[in-house]
Image: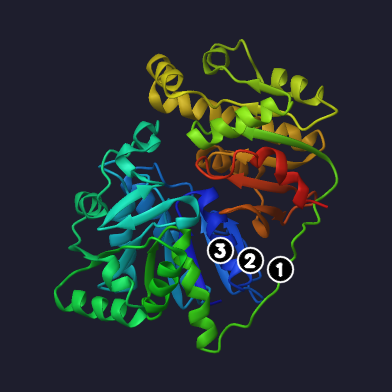
Amino acid sequence: MLLGAIADDLTGATDLALTLSRGGMRTIQTIGVPRGDLDLSDVDAVVVALKSRTNPAAEAVALSLEALGFLQAAGARQFLFKYCSTFDSSPAGNIGPVIEALMEALETNLTIICPAFPANGRTIYKGHLYVGDQLLSDSPMRNHPLTPMTDSSLIRLMAGQSSLKVGLVPHESVARGAKAVADAFVQARAGGIQALVVDAISDLDLKVIGEAAADHVLVTGGSGIALGLPENFRRAGLLQPASHATTFAAPAGRSMILAGSCSEATRGQIRTAIAAGVPALKLDPMAIADGRFRVDDAMSWALAQAAQVPLLYSSAEPEEVKAAQTALGRERAGSLIEHFLAETALRLRAAGVSRLIVAGGETSGAVVGALAPEALLIGPEIDPGVPWTLTLGETDPMALALKSGNFGAPDFFLKAWDLLQ
């Protein structure tokens, strides 16, 4: 194995695994740290998917170090800590503490901070993170129910979350190529800088940064930072080109969509699906909380939609989310929906549903945690950062598309099925 990655949520792990797979690395994604023997003899990269994004820092650190230990034992030569391309984290968040802990464990004194993902509109300029043409703090992420982002400066965010000395590699250096970026790394080390925010506004920038970081034991960022890593191993004679199918042999069975994300993108995808005639049922957290709506009710509705792929969703406008959080408590409102959709997914599998789209990082983590596959095989890309996957280690495999809430075109729920055969 060449590259070992730790992702702080499930959909982000899938996004990263897809990027590595497209780069020619034979990649699998594990659900948590594997407990049994996992055959890695024919694998170039392993992405360990954690559910640690919103955990207290101490818990996130412990989980990440456990994943690191597994990847070290498996022989990885380089390590990547993957977090969201919108740096989802509260001011007291855990991205900084996890990076510090990984650096200490790997005995390295410099890493990079680069959550850019230009294909999905996430860019970094002068150390500030943008979503499309808006600063992160002006984007819809400012209303995220769990990790509201009210600052766009990655330098300030990292300085507030860690004791690391943080610096910047500006885009002017990145535009001059990999040698200029590598020289900036050398200068940073000499000046005692430990974490370098690196500007990136295009995929070419990310490839340049990846090339410059070839000798870094630890790289951190969004999935986009992996664009330049496979070629480093290829240049070293450790990796051969690989081809990938454009269609996916999915198990036969019924299909279903579960959406728990309240992001603007997912809400738009729901509206598009409903306008196209997709049968849809919106969940009411208050009705679930007081027992007026149960999983049995959701199952009865879903299985009655025989002619089409039904959509069951809890996605709501920010005002509705705030009202539910006020009534139920912030944590309970979120976990209530996650547990409901996870239990629904289990029941759907038992009822013969074998093709499932899940929207939302926290929702996807809950659903896959309930389904408990050993690992996921990465299939074709539906939209940037979102592939179909196939569960491994199960008697009855499922095709899963695990979509980060912010990802995907408006017609995502409609077109995803076209890649299955």
* Mark linked to residue 244: 1
Q: Is residue 232 above or below residue 101?
A: below
- Specify the amino acid type for callout 1: His
| Residue 413 screen position, x and y as percent | 67, 38
| Residue 283 screen position, x and y as percent | 60, 20
Between discs 2 and 3, the one toward the N terminus: 3
Q: Secondary structure at mark 2?
A: loop
User: Residue 248 is drawn in which quadrant?
Assistant: bottom right
User: Residue 82 is drawn in which quadrant?
Assistant: bottom left
Q: Quadrant of the N terminus?
A: bottom right
User: Residue 279 is drawn in which quadrant?
Assistant: top right
Q: Find disc 2 in the rendering and name its residue.
A: 37
Q: Find disc 3 in the rendering and name its residue.
A: 19
Q: Residue at x 55, y 84 (%)?
A: 234
Q: Is residue 342 above or below residue 11?
A: above
Viewer can see residue 75: yes
Q: Nearer the viewer, residue 365 or 23?
A: 23
Q: Nearer the viewer, residue 291 or 235?
A: 235
Residue 222 in the figure: left or right of residue 409: left
Image marks 1 and 3: residues in contact by CB distance under 8 Å: no
Q: Nearer the viewer, residue 356 or 57?
A: 356
- Specify the amino acid type for callout 3: Thr
Q: Residue furthest bottom?
A: 237
How many other residues sit within 10 Å of disc 1, few (<14), some (14-19) or many (≥20)?
few
